């Protein structure tokens, strides 16, 4: 892995990205991430606040020190979400999960604002897909119902375009 000047660390987790098989039930069981599964950049420290696992760099306030991989946890210790911080701000792709390990959302961030795709899932099915630019919805936004019907709404500056 290359060390990048700005401490951008890819979201690579030894545990948590895979699922362990439950021999008794034959079903996949979410892996509970640990501090050891977090891959922090050189000179940074993996820490937990009881609700999440993250890497810290030197700064006065804990939130400002977050840089690198971040994992949020459900109360039972299973992974609720994962992404990266850069200088205390969410950056890049963040993925969120329910307690069974099913993906519920994918959100792209830039400087802590939605920037790029925002996708929601229910039971493995995409129900919403939006595009954001600097925190505002832009362009066509898609909603998918249970029967497969797609509703498209055009947005400009976070407001629906009236035709």
Image (cartoon, grey):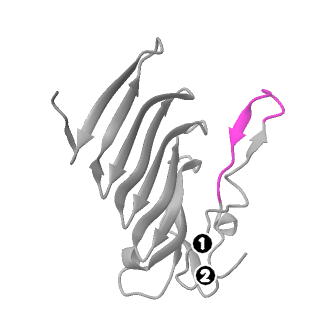
Q: Earlier in the sequence, mark 1 or mark 2?
A: 2
163 above or below 95?
Answer: above
Task: Give the left or right position of residue 141, taking residue 119 as reference.
Answer: left
Q: For the residue labelled by badge 2, is the local secondary structure a helix, a strand or a loop?
A: loop
Query: In this orientation, which residue lies closer to the viewer: 110 or 64?
Result: 110
| Quarter where residue 139 is shown | top left
Q: Would you say the residues marked 1 and 2 are in contact, meaning their CB atoms lie under 8 Å apart?
A: yes
Q: Which residue is mark 1?
A: 9
Residue 30 at x, y percent in the picture: 67, 43
The residue that appears at 43% across and 79% down in the rendered structure is 65
Q: Residue at x 82, y 29 (%)?
A: 24
Q: Quadrant of residue 115?
A: bottom left
Overall secondary structure of the magenta stretch? loop
- Asked if residue 72 can be seen in this view, the reply is no
Q: Can the viewer see residue 139 in this picture? A: yes
Q: Count neighbours of disc 1 (C-alpha within 10 A) and say few if under 14, some if 14 to 19, many if 20 or more.
A: some
């Amino acid at each position: 892995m290359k060390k990048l000047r700005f401490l951008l660390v890819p979201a690579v987790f030894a545990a948590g990205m895979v699922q362990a098989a439950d021999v008794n039930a034959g079903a996949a069981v979410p892996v509970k991430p640990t501090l050891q599964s977090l891959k922090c950049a050189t000179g940074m420290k993996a820490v937990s606040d009881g609700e999440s696992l993250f890497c810290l760099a030197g700064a006065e306030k804990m939130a400002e020190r977050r840089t690198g991989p971040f994992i949020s946890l459900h109360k039972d210790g299973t992974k609720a979400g994962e992404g990266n911080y850069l200088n205390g701000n969410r950056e890049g792709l963040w993925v969120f999960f329910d307690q069974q390990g099913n993906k519920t959302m994918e959100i792209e961030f830039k400087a802590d604002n939605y920037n790029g795709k925002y996708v929601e899932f229910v039971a493995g099915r995409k129900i919403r897909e939006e595009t954001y630019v600097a925190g505002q919805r832009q362009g066509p936004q898609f909603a998918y119902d249970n029967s497969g019907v797609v509703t498209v709404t055009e947005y400009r500056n976070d407001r629906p375009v009236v035709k």
